[in-house]
Image: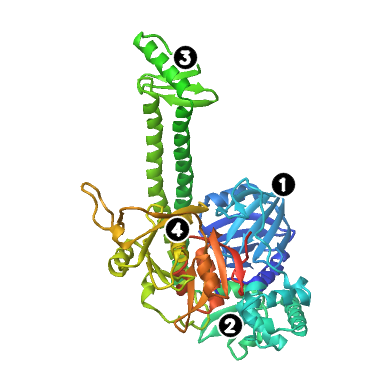
Amino acid sequence: MKESESSFDVTASVKELQALIGGRVDKIFHPDLDHLVLVVRRPSESKSYVHFFIGRWLYVSDRSQEMPAAPSDFAMMLRKRITNARIVDVRQQGFDRIAVISLEKEDKYELVLELFGDGNVILIQDGIIIQPLTSHTWKHRDVRARREFSFPPPVPVPMAMQPRDLLMILNASDTDLVRTLATKLNIGGRYSEEICARAGIDKKKMSKEIDENSAKSILETINSFRDEVLRSVQGLIVLKEESVEDVVPVRLSIYEGHAQEEFQSYSQAVESYVSRIPKKQVEERKESRLELERLQRKLAQQENAVIALQDQAREAQLHGDYLFANYEDVDRILTMAKDRLAEEKPLTDLPGFLSFDRKSSIMKVLIKTTQVELNPKGTVQSNAQMYYEGAKKARHKLEGVLAALDQAKKEIYDLKTSEAAREPTGKKKLAPTKRFWFERFRWFVSSEGAIVLGGKDAKSNDMLVKKHLAPGDRYAHADVHGAPSVVVKMREGVTEATLHEACEFAVATSRAWNANIGSAAGYWVLPEQVSKTPESGEYLAKGAFIIRGRRNYSDKLEIKLGLGEIEYEGTRKIMCGPEMAIRAHSQRYVMIRPGREDKNDFAKKAADVFQVPIEEIQSILPPGDIKVVEQVGISVSSQET
């Protein structure tokens, strides 16, 4: 069952909305969290109702519906700005799932309707965002009020391509033709099948096997199909066993033999289709969207708290260091202050004096160019220690906030995963690869062939060390609070190279990934140095261990992993591990770092490329969002620099 419009569908929707050019916006309603309605009036015409189901559907109707009496804040903002504004243009942004309505009143506005991802509605004036329905920030795009507006990175426009342009895309793909057209040309699965069928090319043919003549035929078919969509004055609902399966603007050969209902316009077909989506499915999506927005607000608050605490800890540390660096000046001021207080004289004539609070006994002074707070009853050392204690407290709070941040990201990830699992894909279920005993943990095969295991949580940390850390093995850990335990199952021929990789793995699978700190330190020790018995008076959390004796450190370890296809004991496996391990065992892989691409979205694409269930990819990826920095033998994602 189709869940949202594809690019060709948006072309059809925009074409029908263009009939409203010249009309004026009468009212705006926001009847539901994911539903916006624009009422448009035109001279000597009945009112039209533009329905936008955020991120899903866009159509125009002539039927009025009961609307809520009290408008939402977003609807009120739109009413204030664009009520009585004239519609001067409606266009599709390139070949993307974005519709843009241009409006004129005293000022000029653009209303951007996004039908990809979670969707959005954004009001723009003179290139500046007045207000988005939902605020988001990505590396290359900031969708927030009073920011300069930019569209997402453009998708390829197949209608503007030459055969050689298409061949470059096809030659870089490791999947079959239908998948490449669907994902790289933004056509969508069903329409990609239709293009292949009309062009007379086997949809399962590998993309690299397509020659220039076939590429030319594909582009001609795409152009012809788009022209047909633009000429169409109908819409159709495709049925499967009496249930709605698809809604399309033209007849598709792939649905030959299916029962179909014909309508006088594509909008009428979409309106009927949307009304027949099971209510339970609609309610689940609504609840999911509400929960997602709550979690995203929570995540934004925690990210701000992380920045504030990092600044607080850094500033306190620097102030403590500054007091020692200017020891003589600080000591002289403290001595003078003590004398004046003893004589009950004011402190106002002290060098650099700014203020004094008798209640807290803290004075503010300017030492050279830096303002510091001092307790005049203390020494240079005690005042510096006051700052160091403040830095320590801020770092302690930071650990708690980072843990909460990890949890919020996990909740968002789990919510998106469950939402994706509910949506029917129409694809054949992919078979998982053979499962090995060590997959209850994080794992990789080192460049020298050793199995390296890592904990996933406190429980698996305990199990890993208690059951699998044997004499002769090695234990590795990141110098990061709450990092997983890592065990190297030693074998003949294993050297420092494997131990270095184990330290890299420990760092990359720790909170350092979400903190996006660039690099961190790790270390390895012998099994006999690892203990579960704390010293008297010490407390040991679940999953934690005491390390006694010398630690063998590896400093400035880059936070970077690879995801690739390997062969293990004669069977194909997908492995996520350190760079050298991946390069040693795989010829088809991607290198990833912390970034802004949603982990769930990346997992979907990787699962499609490696032809394994998405859960198999999700279970081995690092704990946060990613960016792709290198691709070898495959194309999973848009590579960032």
The residue furthest left is: 536
When asked about the image quadrant of residue 336, the answer is: top left
Q: Please name the residue that numbered disc 4 is placed on.
A: 507
Q: Amino acid at mark 3?
A: Leu
Q: Are marks 2 and 3 in contact (CB under 8 Å)?
A: no
Image location (x, y in percent) of residue 4:
57, 71
Q: Is residue 273 above or below residue 340?
A: below
Instruction: Tell me the crowding category of disc 4: few under 14, some 14 to 19, or many 20 or more residues within 10 angstroms, Cα based.
Output: many
Image location (x, y in percent) of residue 176:
62, 82
Q: Is residue 120 above or below residue 380?
A: below
Q: Secondary structure at mark 2?
A: strand
Q: Amino acid at mark 2?
A: Val
Mark sitting on residue 107: 1
Q: Please name the residue that numbered disc 2 is placed on.
A: 238
When asked about the image quadrant of residue 136, the answer is: bottom right
Q: Secondary structure at mark 3?
A: loop
| Disc number lying in front (2 or 3) | 3
Q: Are marks 4 and 3 in contact (CB under 8 Å)?
A: no
**C-alpha gap between disc 1 and disc 2:** 43 Å
Q: Quadrant of the C terminus?
A: bottom right
Q: Please name the residue that numbered disc 3 is placed on.
A: 350
Image location (x, y in percent) of residue 26:
64, 55
| Disc number lying in front (3 or 1) | 3
Question: Measuring 33% from the left and 63% from the top, which residue is drawn there?
Answer: 461
Q: Secondary structure at mark 1?
A: loop
The answer to whether residue 99 is left or right of residue 626 is: right
**In this orientation, does residue 83 appear?**
no
Numbered marks: total: 4
Mark sitting on residue 413: none
Q: Earlier in the sequence, mark 3 or mark 1?
A: 1
Q: Earlier in the sequence, mark 4 or mark 2?
A: 2
Q: Amino acid at mark 4?
A: Val
